[in-house]
Amino acid sequence: MSELSRDALLNIVRDAYERHDPVPDHLVATMQAAAAMAASDLDLELMELVERSTELAGARGSTSYTLRFVHGDTDLLLRIAVDNGRSRVDGWIVPAEPMTIRALPGEEPVTHEAVVSDSGRFALTDLPVGLMRLRLEPHDGSRPAFATPTFEI
């Protein structure tokens, strides 16, 4: 039995991966959209994803999950519900402070926005499914805007 060359062995491994674990069709477009979003707001500070939990999907095809982001002393908790191709984001900011939340969808040019209540709560409704990022704009002019990393709904 002859030994395989390095290139021949790597070709066998590549063929096995291409057949059994191909790159998802949407991956390249998703990563390009995320890079474009990041490049458009390089001056923004990003929050860090701390926690993600998934709840059971509903019987009618709806699903919901929770994301938690932290930036300095600001804690952001999001409950995301998806139903029939649209989504709703209910959020809570601690400590509560006056700010505007803008949802920046990856493929829709329209931004959705909400103002945080005195209790720190806000809701964004009728959002598209896909890539999303939230930009938090404190009403206190001395604090700069910051954003979540891009996440997928």
Image (cartoon, helix red, strand yellow):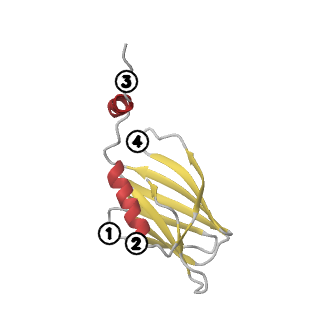
The residue identified by callout 4 is 61
Residue 37 visible here: yes
Please report contact status of discs 2 and 3: CB closer than 8 Å, yes or no: no
Of tags 2 and 4, the one toward the viewer is: 2
Mark 1 burial class by Cα count in 10 Å: few <14, some 14-19, many 20+: few
Q: Which mark is residue 6?
A: none
Label 2 sits on a secondary structure element that is: helix
CA gap between label 3 and label 1 equals 52 Å
Q: Earlier in the sequence, mark 4 or mark 3?
A: 3
- Please tell me which residue lies in front, 143 or 129: 143
Q: Position of residue 62 (x, y in %)?
A: 43, 45
Of tags 2 and 1, the one toward the viewer is: 2
The residue identified by callout 3 is 4
Q: Where is 23 relative to 15, above or below?
A: below
CA gap between label 4 and label 1 equals 27 Å
Q: Position of residue 120 (x, y in %)?
A: 62, 70
Residue under the point 36% across and 54% down: 30
Q: Earlier in the sequence, mark 4 or mark 1?
A: 4
Please report contact status of discs 2 and 4: CB closer than 8 Å, yes or no: no
Residue under the point 36% across and 60% down: 33
Mark 2 burial class by Cα count in 10 Å: few <14, some 14-19, many 20+: few
- Please tell me which residue lies in front, 125 or 103: 103
- Which amino acid does the dot numbered 3 rest on? Leu
The residue identified by callout 2 is 40
Q: Which mark is residue 109?
A: 1
